[in-house]
Structures are given as structure tokens and as C-alpha cells.
Image (cartoon, grey):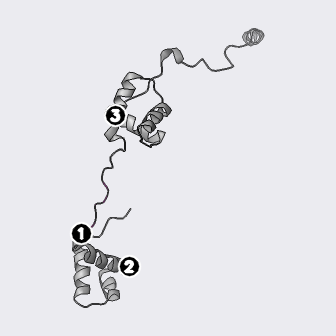
Amino acid sequence: MAKPYSSDLRARIVRSVEEGVTLEETAERHHVSLSTVVRLLRLKRETGSVIPAQFGGYKRHKLASHEGRIRQWVAEQPDITLAELKAKLTKVKVMVSQSSIFRFLRHLNLTFKKKPSRRRAGPAGRRRRAPSLTKTATEA
């Protein structure tokens, strides 16, 4: 994504138009588009300055205000699922997706560990060779 024009260039563009230069000549002189000149003039008229708005930055999590509640739920029930957390949040009128709940939990360093008793069985099939094949393989 392109960065905003510098404040100095923005000020020179507006000053040029205020001195009586046409919009087209100003755009050509400063190597910007005509729409940029018009937009900067509108910004100057509406806000009184041509300083660019904040570019980038940090966006807070929507669940940040519910951090204590979520930590408590996870502490009470460590194997709680994302769907269960979403249902609990819906009860307190917080509408978020499961993926945003996951991202927030990862942000809080709250992990989900599966219980050892729930481990998967080994891979299906191909456990051992058939007895008749082992004899012929060793003989050959």
C-alpha cells in the first residue's frame, strides 16, 4: 500500500491553488493527479489542515474488555471448546466468530492441551506383515 504524500507537498499544492493557479496546472506542476488536488482542497476546507490521517497502527481485539471473564472460563474448564466459549459470549451479548476467539486466546497465551486419555489410536492398516509374506521374504 502506498504511503500518504508528505505534509510539505500537501501544503504546497493547497498554497498553489490559493495563489490562483488552476487545478490542472497545480496537478501537473506537482506531479499528482487532479483528484488528489481536489481531495486536498476539500480536506483543507473541512478540517482546516492538510495533515494526513494516521497510517497503520495497532487494532485492539474486540474481546479485550472481556479478558477477565474469558480467563475465568478457561481456568474453570481448561478443555472448553471454541464453540462453548462463543455460546457463553453470546449469552452476555458479545457477537464474535470462533476464529476471533481463537486469535484472542492465542494473544493471551492460553493454549488448549488435549487430555492424554483422548489420544488417537495408531494409524489404521499396515500394522504388521502377514505371516505368510514374512516367511517368503526372509527365504528369498
Residue placed under numbered mark 1 in the picture:
51
Specify start and end residues of the magenta stretch as a single range. 50-57
Image point 45% across, 38% down: which residue? 90
Q: In this rendering, is residue 134 above or below 4?
A: above
Q: Nearer the viewer, residue 69 or 102?
A: 69
Instruction: Answer with mark 2 or mark 3, whichever residue precedes in sequence.
Output: 2
Q: Nearer the viewer, residue 140 or 14?
A: 14
Residue 30 visible within the image: yes
Question: What's under tag 1, amino acid-wise?
Answer: Ile
Name the dominant secondary structure of the magenta segment. Answer: loop
Question: What's under tag 3, amino acid-wise?
Answer: Leu
| Disc assigned to residue 108 | 3
Q: Are marks 3 and 1 in contact (CB under 8 Å)?
A: no
Q: Are marks 2 and 3 in contact (CB under 8 Å)?
A: no
Picture coordinates of residue 128, whole percent (x, y): 68, 13
Q: In this rendering, is residue 65 above or below 57?
A: above
| Disc assigned to residue 35 | 2
